[in-house]
Image (cartoon, helix red, strand yellow):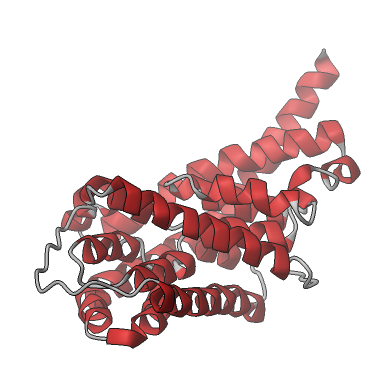
Amino acid sequence: MHELLHEGFHLLEHTLLDTINLIPFLFVTYLLMEYLEHKAGDHTSNFVKKAGRLGPVFGALAGGVPQCGFSAAAANLFTGRVISMGTLIAIFLSTSDEMLPILISEKAKVSTIFAFVGIKMAVGMIAGLIIDLVLPAKADDHDHIHEMCEEEHCHCEKGIFVSAVTHTLHITFFILLITLALNVVMHTVGEEALGNLVLNRPVLGPIVAGVVGLIPNCASSVVLTQLFLNGAMGFGGLMAGLLVNAGIGVLVLFRVNHDMKENFKVLGLLYGIGVVAGMLLGLIPVTV
């Protein structure tokens, strides 16, 4: 019993130390993200709205910029028929949220971070352009944009510092829980057995990771990135989950767009593209 308590305390201590070391990196990253969002958010939205047939290209580029609210803004733009379905999908696929601060805080290679973001943007562009060829957008002169995520999700009204602190504490809590769970599993099961999990398999991994990515919450991208960094998930699974994960964008889409058939079409396209792309990307050997 004493030995078991000692091991448990050691795991908890190790987890706390690992998590505490991440906090400064997370905070600085989120502060930068909040600054970018508040200073460039409106300009980005207006730029994408005026892009026309190149909407998916500029949408994917905009989605790659680390910010929490643009996928939600895109859902509103699409609901108001200001942007096309291809542009919406491009933004959803390229959206970069919790992946970036976690990779940065874990001191991943800069080239790796840019590669991850670049892949997401490239997949978003290609998929968006194809979708717009197959499903051309219907013209609509009305702009029904609503600012729905600010107070609930970003605490924008309190300023970028408070918002960055809130995000940092929120994600630190998730990282603490996930890291502790992973440490317990790795200690109990062993790294070799963990590497043989379904999430590390070429086909089933991306399928399951895509389901995790559909969860409209920052926790899903935290889970996926941490699993990958701990060797419990392959690159294909990681990319499938991160491509599918559009932050709160899908949640806002279902809230503001009353055409449920259209919403599920977007959801199906997002999942299918993300999983297929993940399976193909899984053929590429990647190290962080």
Quadrant of the snapshot with the N terminus: top right
| Residue ID at (53%, 53%) | 221
Q: Residue furthest front?
A: 134
Q: Please state if 48 lies on the left or on the right of 214 as rendered.
A: left
Residue 163: x and y in percent read 29, 56
Residue toward you, 134 or 212: 134
Q: Please state if 45 lies on the left or on the right of 124 as rendered.
A: left
| Residue ID at (82%, 42%) | 194
Residue toward you, 19 or 112: 112
Residue 109: x and y in percent read 67, 76
Please tell me whether residue 70 is drawn above or below residue 241 in the rendered image.
below
| Residue 248 can be seen in this image | no
Quadrant of the snapshot with the C terminus: bottom right
| Residue ID at (71%, 40%) | 182
Residue toward you, 84 or 18: 84
| Residue 150 can be seen in this image | yes
Please tell me whether residue 107 is drawn above or below residue 241 in the rendered image.
below
